[in-house]
Image: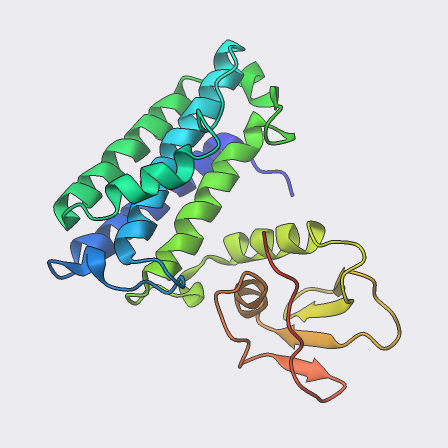
Amino acid sequence: MTIDPLVLMTDVDQATERLIRTAEGLEPGAESAPSLLPGWTIGHVLTHVARNADSFVNLLTWARTGVETPQYPTPTAREEGIEAGRRRPLAEQIADLRESHERFADAGAAMPAEAWAFHVPSTGRSAAYLPWARLREVEVHHVDVGRGYTPEDWSDGFALRLLREIVGGAEKDAAGLVLRPHGLEHPLTMGAVTDASPAVGGPTRSIAAWLAGRADGSDLTVSPDGTLPTPPRWK
């Protein structure tokens, strides 16, 4: 599924604004409250989203200039950045979200057309993939905040692309699954599918959220009748 990266940059703008509105509606001190991610507070989630934007600025800079600019300067920088910022007051977290997004948007706007085709070695993909990767981070972690934004709020296009990405990235020797999203003419398959592999059906958003570990799959069906299988771990 190929989408113009500049179109996706607009989607990132809108998704980030939705996340900021959610954060602005939180009560004082909410940064210390648990998120839906085990072991992470809301402050962890918001700080991670901000630092992820800056890490993608590094990759866009690499693509634009050709000068090696790693996503994170050291192997431990990602975790250190989250830990350093997670306890900040909510107002600082919100300002950081907005300012880091502006840096990402500016980096995207500075990209000449040919730079989007640059192969970013650390990702194994072209720079044109980065706006989608950023959109995925914002939308999925908005759900993780756990304050009213759910996979039901994802757009049809986002849910379908997320679903296809998870399916495409599944290990070939994983337990086989046949997926039947409503509205798709042909089923999707994951892992080593056999005649005995279960078929899971339901709304695209629900299947994508279940595979991403953001829903329990309670609204999905299984054929033949039985217990919903445990999905492969999404990396």
Residue furthest to the right in view is 195
Q: Is residue 152 above or below residue 130?
A: below
Q: Along the horizontal axis of the image, is 13 left or right of 90? A: right
Q: What is the x, y in percent for residue 146?
A: 32, 65
Residue occupying image coordinates x 68% and y 75%:
200
Residue at 64%, 82% (x, y): give it.
Answer: 221
Image check: 128 left or right of 37? right
Residue 12 lies, with reference to residue 75, above or below; the image says: below
Which quadrant holds residue 41?
Answer: bottom left
Spot the residue most to the left.
28
Frontmost residue, 202 versus 124: 124
Q: Where residue 123 appears, x then y in whole percent?
A: 60, 31
Q: Residue at x 44, y 64 (%)?
A: 151
Picture quadrant of residue 26 = bottom left
Residue 2 at x, y = what percent?
63, 38
Q: x, y (%) of residue 222? A: 69, 82
Q: Quadrant of residue 227?
A: bottom right
Q: Quadrant of the N terminus?
A: top right
Left or right: 64 in relation to 126: left
Which residue is at 53% across, 53% downward?
Answer: 157
Q: Is residue 28 above or below residue 8?
A: below
